[in-house]
Image: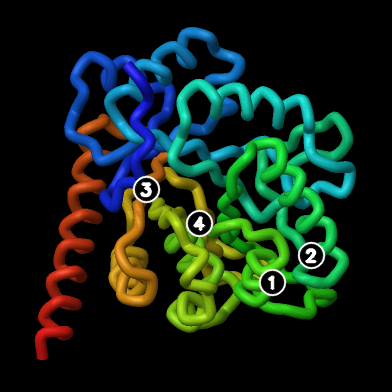
Amino acid sequence: MKPIHRIPNTAGLGLRLAHFAEMVETRPAAGWLEVHPENVLANPHAAEILVELSCHYPVSLHTVGISIGSVTGIDRSHLRRLRGLIDTIDPFLVSGHLAWSIYGNEYLNDLLPLPYDAETLGLVEAQVREIQDVLGRPYLIENPASYVGFRSSTMTEPEFLCEMVRRTGCQLLCDVSNVVVSAHNMNYDPYRCIDDFPADAVREIHLGGYTPEEEECTPGSELWIDTHAAAISQRSWDLYEYTLRRFGEKPTLIEWDNSIPPLETLLEETRKAEKIARMMGLETRHAGAH
């Protein structure tokens, strides 16, 4: 069988290794699957399972090891391995983060922030162009969860993303929960951020849970951490509704990477996202009828 590569307008789930075997055995009704390629490139058995699943579900790849903001450059050998996996399963989207996580030969287990200025723009532009040339397709850039800002930044995050789209032709992954987290931590309006996003470039939406932690520097206040270790908050669901009105229906992913629950819990979250999308579609059609 050949991989399924149609672009779904339904909700999908982030498939982690804990659920690979169950997905193969039960093949539940799921709109699509998104996988971190780094979890399968060094795991031949997992790669075989992913190839099998790609014949039954549309698959998207969400990279965590490309590091488009590293001043020492991207890992070209990793990029070539990624291209090999892409050629095998033909994912309908390939995405990564607006962040850096590599310095020299050291891989850091985090997505570290970037200042939004001309120097960073030039660096990221060059590396996104190279990534797209090697992969032979547009690369989706995801807005990060922010915990600090830079005094040197000369543009907002949406302005930076708009310019990156204009320069490289890349596309965007809008992580709605990251907007909620960043807006709280950095004290801005999440709805205004969605308004300022380059809507025509958005191809995918993410939703995930976050964890409030006490802010050590400011007792009594909270820092929200993008842990993907909890159910999606009502704030994120509310902003998701607003985002659908702004962008229209997009493939929406449920992310849960830590304290991973049973597969049925993830599927229930996808059904909730699909219900909201159907309601938004019905609301839009009714509005147009009047």
Residue 65 located left or right of residue 266: right
Find disc 1 in the rendering and name its residue: 163
Find disc 2 in the rendering and name its residue: 121
Q: Earlier in the sequence, mark 2 or mark 3?
A: 2
Question: Going by the picture, which residue comes out furthest to the bottom?
Answer: 290
One can see residue 257 in this view: no
Q: Earlier in the sequence, mark 3 or mark 1?
A: 1
Which of the labelled discs sits on residue 173, or is there none? Answer: 4
| Badge 4: residue crowd in 10 Å (few <14, some 14–19, many ≥20) | many
Quarter where residue 149 is shown: bottom right
Name which residue lies at 37% across and 25% down. Answer: 3
Name which residue lies at 74% across and 50% down. Answer: 129
Spatial CA distance of label 3 from label 4 is 10 Å
Between 201 and 123, the one nearer to me in the picture: 201
Considering the numbered disc 1 on the image, is that residue within a helix, a strand or a loop?
A: helix
Spatial CA distance of label 2 from label 1 is 8 Å
Q: Tell me the quadrant of the picture where the C terminus can be found.
A: bottom left
Image x and y of residue 223, in percent: 55, 64
Are discs 2 and 1 less than 8 Å apart at CB? yes
Give the vertical position of 285 relative to 89 (above or below). below
